[in-house]
Image (spheres, helix red, strand yellow):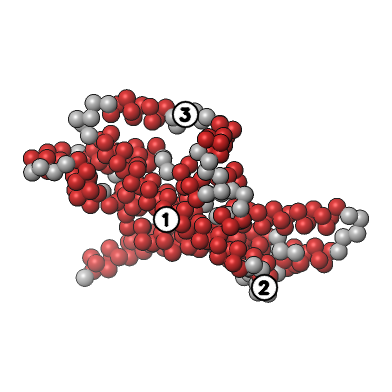
Amino acid sequence: MVRIRSYRLSRLPIHLFFIAVSAVFIVPLWSIIAISLSNELDISNFGYHLIPKKIDFQAYHYIFDNPMTIVNAYKVTAITSVIGTLLSVIMISMCAYALSRSDFKYSKIITFYLFFTTLFSGGIVPFYILMTKFLHLQNTYAALIIPLLGNIWYMFLMRTFFKQLPDSLVESAKIDGAGELRIYITMIVPLSTPVLATVGLMQLLIYWNSWFNALLFIDKQSLYPLQYLLQVMMSNIQEILRNMTSGGQVDATMLANLPTESTRMAMCILAIAPMLFVFPFFQKYFAKGLTVGAVKG
């Protein structure tokens, strides 16, 4: 009993340290929420505070002035994120599985070719011409999904994981008459849950935070993803501020009450809130998926 108590007391400083570190990580998120609920005049007069002097929903009122626009942006982002993540995980995993097979004689050549593409870029202009003039994908969901499907680093991560699986599994399945596709679906995929979940989460974050492809290829507001819509709204606020300050007479009260900083933080909350609910479901696979291949036996 004495040993158990001393052991627990000896670990108390470590636990307190990590509790303090966790609190430090929570403070930025808490500050974003507090600023988004603060009055713009209070922010300009007193600066940022972790507890708002007066709770004000003006920033959220501004963003949700046309609620269907936000709802539609969430819909576009959800569709592109879900479909894009599923397609990218399937494509990346199938390519990684093929490259992980020791009996695939072109593995090294294709691996070098894929790695070489990460060193150079074709440029934005050829990319834009390809997507709009040849593929005719402007103002389509495909323009938001296809450019982000492939990720070479995640493919190498999966390939490392697949190489650790025993070759005897594939050989025994072949002896039983299973084909390559059946081996991949019924054996490789169930054994690769950690790395598939990790890559899926990372790809989901990439799609959810994507806005640059919308800037290039989307002209219809009905196809604006969430991140790009929020950026457009922020640009509109900056334009209003520019017009207000360009004239000789400036209403200081109106200028101070115009939501700028609070709107930025409210936009951050709207952007990250869904991911905060999604991440806990992947957390148990995340560490194992990222550390896979670090130690080889």
Is residue 97 found left or right of 206 in the rendered image?
A: left
- Apparent side of residue 106 relative to residue 216 in the rendered image (left or right): left
Of circles 2 and 3, which is in front? Answer: 3
Structural distance between the alpha carbons of marks 1 and 2:
34 Å
- Percent x, y of residue 20: 46, 61
Q: Is residue 71 above or below residue 290?
A: below
**Is 88 or 155 nearer to us in this picture?**
88
Q: Position of residue 4 (x, y in %)?
A: 24, 67
Residue under the point 55% across and 65% down: 71
**Disc ID at residue 82:** 1
Type of amino acid at the residue the image marks with label 1: Val
The quarter of the picture where residue 170 lies is top left
Q: CA distance from mark 2 to mark 3?
A: 48 Å
Q: Is residue 156 above or below residue 285?
A: above
Give the residue at x 40% y 51%. 85
The quarter in which the C terminus is drawn is top left
Q: Amino acid at mark 3?
A: Leu
Amino acid type of the residue that numbered disc 2 sits on in the rendered structure: Asp
Q: Earlier in the sequence, mark 3 or mark 1?
A: 1
Query: What x and y, as percent, mark residue 56?
Result: 67, 73
What residue would you read off at disc 3? Answer: 119
Instruction: From this view, report whether residue 117 is shown above or below residue 277.
Output: above
Pointer 1 or 2: first along the chain: 2
* Nearer the camera: disc 3 or disc 1: 1
> Dot 2 lies on which element?
loop
Q: How many marks?
A: 3
Crowd rating for badge 1 (residues with CA inside 10 Å; few <14, some 14–19, many 20+): some
Name the residue beneath numbered marker 2.
56
Q: Secondary structure at mark 1?
A: helix
**At x 13% / y 43%, what residue is drawn?**
178
